[in-house]
Amino acid sequence: MSMRLRPHHGMCFQFYEGKGYSAEFTDHMGGVIRALSERPKTPVRLTLSADAVCEHCPNNLGEVCQSAEKVMRYDAAVLSACGLRDGDELAYADFAARVKERILDAGMRRGICGDCEWDAICAKHRREP
Ligand code: SF4
């Protein structure tokens, strides 16, 4: 069975350092990242609604995120940069590799989610101009 994943979480996962919206959220997000790194062939289904990470987020208002406008914009930009569409399913490793090559290594991250409240964490990993 595939794991539902918001496209922009493919960026968040790569620089995650255990900070988040609540202790329950960070425990859960850390667990999702560990599970995917231990089993990188896990199929992920890309979705523009609440996913496996949102399940334990205090900003999750059911199927809608409290920051819906922002996260939808991030999700759409990640899909476009990676040549993927809502509902596509692929191995997590393949998705993570696309995000790394086409966004992070290409210096596009800040243009996509530079207004995120966690930007300073990802900006430390300078691959961007
Ligand atoms: S509910 Fe919103 S803020 Fe929380 S993890 Fe999901 S997309 Fe991120």
Image (tube, rainbow, N blue to C red):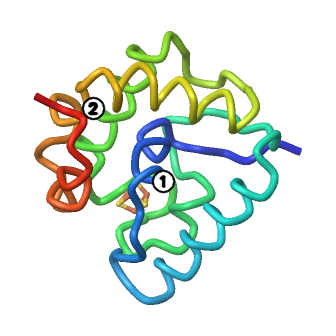
Q: Quadrant of residue 72?
A: top left
User: Compared to 97, does 80 lie above or below?
Assistant: above
Q: Residue furthest bottom?
A: 23
Q: Reading the chain from its start, which is encountered first: label 1 or label 2?
A: 1
Residue sitting at x 30%, y 47%: 68
Q: Is residue 82 left or right of residue 32?
A: left
Q: Quadrant of the N terminus?
A: top right
Secondary structure at numbered mark 2: helix
Type of amino acid under label 1? Phe
What's under tag 2, amino acid-wise?
Arg
Total residue callouts: 2
Q: Quadrant of the C terminus?
A: top left
In this view, the residue in front, 31 or 71, is: 31
> Which of the two residues, 7 or 94, is positioned nearer the viewer here?
94
User: Mark 1 or 2, which is nearer the eye?
Assistant: 1
Residue 35 falls in image quadrant: bottom right
Q: Residue at x 57, y 35 (%)?
A: 96
| Label 1 residue near ligand 1, CB within 8 Å | no
Q: Residue at x 31, y 43 (%)?
A: 71
Q: Which residue corresponds to the image point at 59% horizontal and 44% vertical from the top-left?
A: 5
Residue nearest the observer in this picture, 31 or 48? 31
Residue 90 rendering spot, x and y as whole percentages? 73, 26
For disc 1, the neighbor class at 10 Å (few under 14, some 14 to 19, many from 20) is: some
Is residue 33 depicted above or below 46 in this figure? below
Structural distance between the alpha carbons of marks 1 and 2 = 18 Å
Q: Residues within 10 Å of mark 2 (few under 14, many from 20)?
A: some
Q: What is the x, y in percent for residue 70?
A: 23, 43
What residue sits right under mark 1 in the picture? 13
**Mark 1 falls on what kind of element?**
helix
Q: Residue 98: horizontal and vertical position, in percent?
A: 53, 23
Ligand number 1: quarter of image = bottom left
Instruction: List the residue tagged with mark 2.
Output: 73
